[in-house]
């Protein structure tokens, strides 16, 4: 009995320390994220106005805006997602529904290795394969496709998790109603997994938007308005890198571009969350 | 047209005792003394491990057959043989033959998709899809390419047959998963009925429900029994006695399950013949 009481007496202190450690961890993580965002906004918000987003950069980006950069960024993102989405969705469905054997294990291991490959290595691969071997040159197409290779692992694994997280009862229920394998996948599992798919898509887009190293070697540095997908184009993150590292006096506009990049990420996250809530609210998907 | 005995629950006479079952609209020339579903020496194994073996069982139209027995004796697995759902498990192998309406379910030209349209299944845990009530019911219709013009009428009919229409008619576009457990299970029954099956397999349909919801499902099953061939797995002997016309005892503690006794409900409960059944009844009553 004495031991029991002693143990109970010691518990509040241990619980208190655990609480403190938890709060400290949360505060540190949230605090550093807030610090970065606050710093970017503090230094950059003054540079952002309608003219900044609608005019082309001048004097190596020290003056003017980022209109051409934004166009190149959206085009690279469009190419990347057009290539990565169907491939990613198909691979994730295969892994979740049929990937229990050695082939599935092998594909998963390869994806985990790919997810850990530094982006500069993807950049070098893209520079050799897409730029030289396929002859696409330094272009938005080459950049977008290389970026697709890079976001595929993260897109596939999050999408696969969304599928395999669904209760087995949905599959059995649909099969018992005479649904064929494609009916089960496309009519029952795909809508049910939609919020997870949106999460995977947002992670993929976020990763693609933030990427610099891959695009240095593939889509190039040119900051003029791209004429086509085979034209070179400079993306937002690369513009920020260039202004802050290579252009003396470019910090102000670099911060401005960073604010725009943050805003784009926030808007994409917001749209994803809104879509998920809307689907859940309408009972299209599970909460 | 979904068939339903609208006069409410009526105790059906066991067909084994010669009572006439309500003729089935799918085969008007049917004979109630011939089993609509017949299992002949059926066995199942998963990855080489036998679950049950040698089960021969006649299921009659217009009657509920209950399958009772201890956990692990293979009752639920036996249900999955009748609609070939066991095939979802890559290592599963079935032996013996099953005929539904005189057709061998593995015979030439047999197709699991067509079979599962004829043999509906209700699971232990209600499993509505995470969609609206209406979508849960229209999805099977769309999968089987039934004319869109019929959907609304079929949805209303199925929900009425499952005694759910009055409760949900004003919120068909609300999420199905917001319904109570009992309502969800009735929705699943409606979802099975909407395809107008001939056979209904019920795998412990009340095990996840409270007593009131259980009573509603039991009444529903008894109301539906006029028009369907029904096989229900249950752990609840009192429920088997209330609902079923004939009962089979599947026994297999540590061994592959075997059907040790089968007969009309009253006979099996009042005068069990097999020592295992006697012991099982006594233990369950205690």
Image (tube, rainbow, N blue to C red):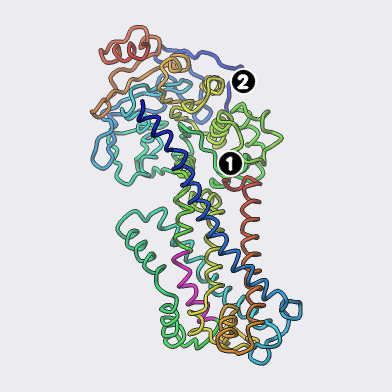
Q: Residue at x 44, y 16 (%)?
A: B245
Instruction: Find residue B257 and report its image quarter.
Output: top left
Check disc 1: other Cα within 10 Å, few if <14, some if 14-19, many if 20+: many
Q: Which mark is residue B208?
A: none
Badge count: 2
Q: Is residue A150 magenta?
A: yes
Q: Is residue B200 visible?
A: yes
Q: Quadrant of the N terminus of chain A?
A: top left
Give the answer, above or below, for where B270 lies relative to B236. above
Q: Position of residue B184 (x, y in %)?
A: 56, 33
> Residue A203 colored magenta?
no
* Residue B226 visible here: no
Gap in angstroms between the C-alphas marked 2 and 1: 24 Å
Say the numbered circle drawn on residue B6: 2
Q: Is residue A2 above or below residue A112?
A: above
Element under disc 2: loop
Q: Residue furthest right?
A: A50
Residue that carries the numbered disc 1 in the rendered image = B136
Residue B68 placement (x, y as % from top left): 37, 21
The tag earlier along the polypeptide, 2 or 1, is: 2
Disc 2 + disc 1, Cβ < 8 Å: no
The mark closer to the camera, 2 or 1, is 1
Question: Relative to residue B127, is residue A43 drawn left or right?
Answer: right
Host chain of mark 1:
B
Magenta span: A141-154
Viewer-side residue, A182 vs A39 = A39
Depicted B34 relative to depicted A61: above or below: above
Left or right relative to B105: residue B147: right
Image point 46% across, 88% down: which residue? A135
Residue drawn 40% across the image and 32% down it: B100
The answer to whether dots 2 and 1 both sit on one chain is: yes
């Amino acid at each position: 009995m004495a031991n029991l009481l002693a143990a109970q007496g010691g518990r509040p202190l241990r619980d208190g320390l655990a609480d403190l450690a938890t709060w400290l961890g949360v505060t540190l993580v949230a605090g550093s994220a807030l610090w970065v965002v606050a710093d970017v906004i503090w230094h950059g918000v003054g540079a952002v106005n309608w003219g900044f987003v609608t005019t082309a950069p001048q004097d190596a980006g020290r003056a003017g805006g980022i209109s051409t950069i934004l166009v190149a960024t959206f085009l690279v993102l469009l190419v990347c997602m057009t290539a990565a989405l169907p491939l990613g969705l198909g691979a994730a469905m295969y892994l979740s529904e049929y990937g229990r054997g050695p082939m599935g294990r092998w594909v998963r291991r390869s994806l985990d290795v790919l997810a850990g490959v530094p982006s500069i290595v993807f950049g070098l691969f893209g520079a050799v394969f897409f730029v030289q071997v396929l002859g696409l040159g330094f272009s938005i197409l080459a950049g977008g496709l290389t970026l697709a290779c890079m976001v595929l692992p993260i897109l596939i694994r999050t999408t696969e998790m969304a599928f395999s997280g669904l209760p087995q009862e949905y599959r059995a229920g649909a099969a018992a109603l005479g649904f064929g394998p494609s009916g089960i996948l496309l009519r029952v599992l795909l809508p049910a997994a939609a919020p997870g798919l949106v999460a995977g898509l947002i992670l993929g887009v976020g990763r693609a938007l933030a990427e610099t190293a891959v695009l240095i070697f593939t889509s190039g540095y040119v900051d003029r308005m791209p004429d086509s997908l085979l034209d070179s184009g400079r993306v937002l993150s690369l513009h920020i890198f260039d202004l802050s590292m290579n252009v003396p006096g470019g910090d102000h506009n670099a911060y401005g571009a960073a604010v725009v990049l943050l805003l784009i990420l926030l808007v994409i996250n917001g749209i994803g969350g809104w879509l998920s809530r809307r689907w859940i609210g309408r009972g299209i998907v599970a909460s | 047209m979904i068939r339903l005995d609208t006069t409410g629950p009526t105790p059906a006479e066991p067909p084994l005792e010669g009572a006439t079952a309500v003729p089935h609209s799918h085969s008007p020339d049917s004979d109630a003394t011939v089993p609509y579903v017949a299992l002949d020496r059926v066995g199942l194994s998963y990855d080489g491990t036998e679950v049950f073996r040698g089960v021969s069982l006649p299921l009659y139209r217009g009657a509920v057959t209950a399958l009772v027995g201890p956990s692990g004796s293979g009752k639920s697995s036996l249900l999955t043989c009748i609609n070939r759902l066991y095939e979802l498990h890559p290592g599963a192998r079935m032996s013996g033959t099953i005929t539904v309406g005189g057709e061998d379910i593995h015979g030439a030209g047999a197709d699991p998709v067509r079979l599962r349209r004829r043999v509906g299944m209700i699971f232990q845990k209600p499993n509505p899809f995470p969609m609206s009530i209406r979508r849960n019911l229209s999805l099977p219709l769309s999968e089987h390419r039934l004319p869109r013009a019929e959907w609304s009428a079929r949805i209303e009919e199925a929900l009425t047959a499952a005694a759910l229409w009055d409760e949900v008619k004003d919120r068909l576009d609300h999420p199905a998963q917001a319904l109570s457990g009992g309502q969800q299970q009735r929705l699943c029954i409606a979802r099975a009925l909407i395809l107008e099956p001939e056979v209904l397999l019920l795998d412990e349909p009340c095990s996840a429900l409270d007593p009131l919801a259980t009573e509603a499902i039991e009444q529903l099953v008894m109301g539906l029994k006029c028009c369907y061939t029904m096989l229900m797995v249950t752990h609840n002997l009192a429920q088997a006695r209330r609902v079923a016309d004939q009962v089979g005892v599947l026994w297999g503690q540590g061994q592959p399950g075997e059907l040790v006794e089968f007969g009309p409900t009253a006979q099996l409960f009042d005068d069990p013949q097999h020592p295992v059944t006697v012991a099982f009844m006594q233990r369950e009553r205690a």
